[in-house]
Image (cartoon, rainbow, N blue to C red):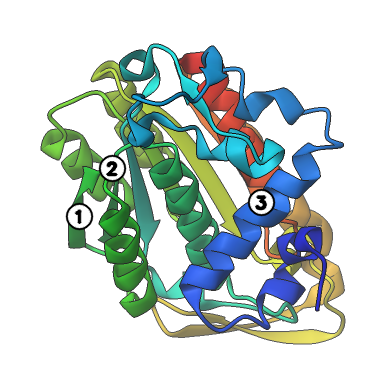
């Protein structure tokens, strides 16, 4: 059986069929790694703690600290440290792509979203889920009850990447739906025009929401490991294009790097986080970004 930290690798988590176990194993692997990580403090530094004693409310137990120490601690000032999060999942057909990895972009995003939901629910942080393509397909209001994790995982397990998408429109609609300041976590390959998306992120930030963009690309989309003639299919339009891989490689890589640089720069300027991921990367990279951002904001 793989060690706990091995479950942070996409090729290992692929062997686990149930989404609830994927989420649990990713988080447990992450917490195991925190023992020797320079990021060890992120899971415990957002509030003061004291040992659990008789009469304390069990719901105030910090389960992250328990997972690391086998001891029960409660957070002081619990109400001041809770955040409300929304996982916002792009269902575009392009998210279903993989070249040679064990997980598609969508599979990878779903595993990461499930792990974040697991982490938030065990921190008693309310978390909800929104899935969209050209329109919002499912919307689950944020809750902090343990049953919420099962509800989120059930929706994620049923979701499929099909058809075209409209990231900007659905981010704007998300902004109009939210009544309280929240942390919006978007999972998308962002294979759309960037400016409308950036405008929508600005709208979310103007409304007081925090935003983390998890930009999930296939490993081949980042490194372009192709040779010879390629028959490319644009999944959402169905159009084919035959190209010479070597002839376009430099221009392609430059375009991808420029796209990510634009998002990173613009997001930094408006106080949003832009996290570059690909389907070969361990899941702890994204979880550290989430926890470090949470610590900085709250």
Mark 3 Cα-neighbour bin, 10 Å: few <14, some 14–19, many ≥20: many
Task: Check the picture and name the quadrant holding the N terminus.
Answer: bottom right
When the figure is inspected, residue 241 is found, relative to residue 24, above or below; the finding is below
Left or right: where 105 falls relative to 138: right
The residue mark sitting in front, 3 or 2, is: 2
The residue under the point 23% across, 44% down is 143
Could you tell which of marks 1 and 3 lies nearer the N-terminus? 1
Of 29 and 198, nearer the camera is 29
The residue under the point 62% across, 80% down is 16
> Which numbered marker is on residue 277?
3
Q: Secondary structure at mark 1?
A: strand
Mark 2 Cα-neighbour bin, 10 Å: few <14, some 14–19, many ≥20: many
Which residue sits furthest front? 54
The residue mark sitting in front, 1 or 3, is: 1
The residue under the point 70% across, 36% down is 69
Of 177 and 293, nearer the camera is 293
The residue under the point 12% across, 29% down is 179
> Which numbered marker is on residue 144?
2
Of 4 and 276, nearer the camera is 4
Q: Is residue 189 visible?
A: no
In the image, residue 210 lies at what x, y percent?
Answer: 39, 25
Mark 1 = which residue?
A: 140
Mark 1 Cα-neighbour bin, 10 Å: few <14, some 14–19, many ≥20: some
Q: CA distance from mark 1 to mark 2?
A: 12 Å
Q: In which quadrant of the rendered view does residue 183 lie?
A: top left
Left or right: where 282 falls relative to 270: right
In the image, residue 224 lies at what x, y percent?
Answer: 79, 67
Of 268 and 60, nearer the camera is 60
Q: In which quadrant of the rendered view does residue 138 lie?
A: bottom left
């Amino acid at each position: 059986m793989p060690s706990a930290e091995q479950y942070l690798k996409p090729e290992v988590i692929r062997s686990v069929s149930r989404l609830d176990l994927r989420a649990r194993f990713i988080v447990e692997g992450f917490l195991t790694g925190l023992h020797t990580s320079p990021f060890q403090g992120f899971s415990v530094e957002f509030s003061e703690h004291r040992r659990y004693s008789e009469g304390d409310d069990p719901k105030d137990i910090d389960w992250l600290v328990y997972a690391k120490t086998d001891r029960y601690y409660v957070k002081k000032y619990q109400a001041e440290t809770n955040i409300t999060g929304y996982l916002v999942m792009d269902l575009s057909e392009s998210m279903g792509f993989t070249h040679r990895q064990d997980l598609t972009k969508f599979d990878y995003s779903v595993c990461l979203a499930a792990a974040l939901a697991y982490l938030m629910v065990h921190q008693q942080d309310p978390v909800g889920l929104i899935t969209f393509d050209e329109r919002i397909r499912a919307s689950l209001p944020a809750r902090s009850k343990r049953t919420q994790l099962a509800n989120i995982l059930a929706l994620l397990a049923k979701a499929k990447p099909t058809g075209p998408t409209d990231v900007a429109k659905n981010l704007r609609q998300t902004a109009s739906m939210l009544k309280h300041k929240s942390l919006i976590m978007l999972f998308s390959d962002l294979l759309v025009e960037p400016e409308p998306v950036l405008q929508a992120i600005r709208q979310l930030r103007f409304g007081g929401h925090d935003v983390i963009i998890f930009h999930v690309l296939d490993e081949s989309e980042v490194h372009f490991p192709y040779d010879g003639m390629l028959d490319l299919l644009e999944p959402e339009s169905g159009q084919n294009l035959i190209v010479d891989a070597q002839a376009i490689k430099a221009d392609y890589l430059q375009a991808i790097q420029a796209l990510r640089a634009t998002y990173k720069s613009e997001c930094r300027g408006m106080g949003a986080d832009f996290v570059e991921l690909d389907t070969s990367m361990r899941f702890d990279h994204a979880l550290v970004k989430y926890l470090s951002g949470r610590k900085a904001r709250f």
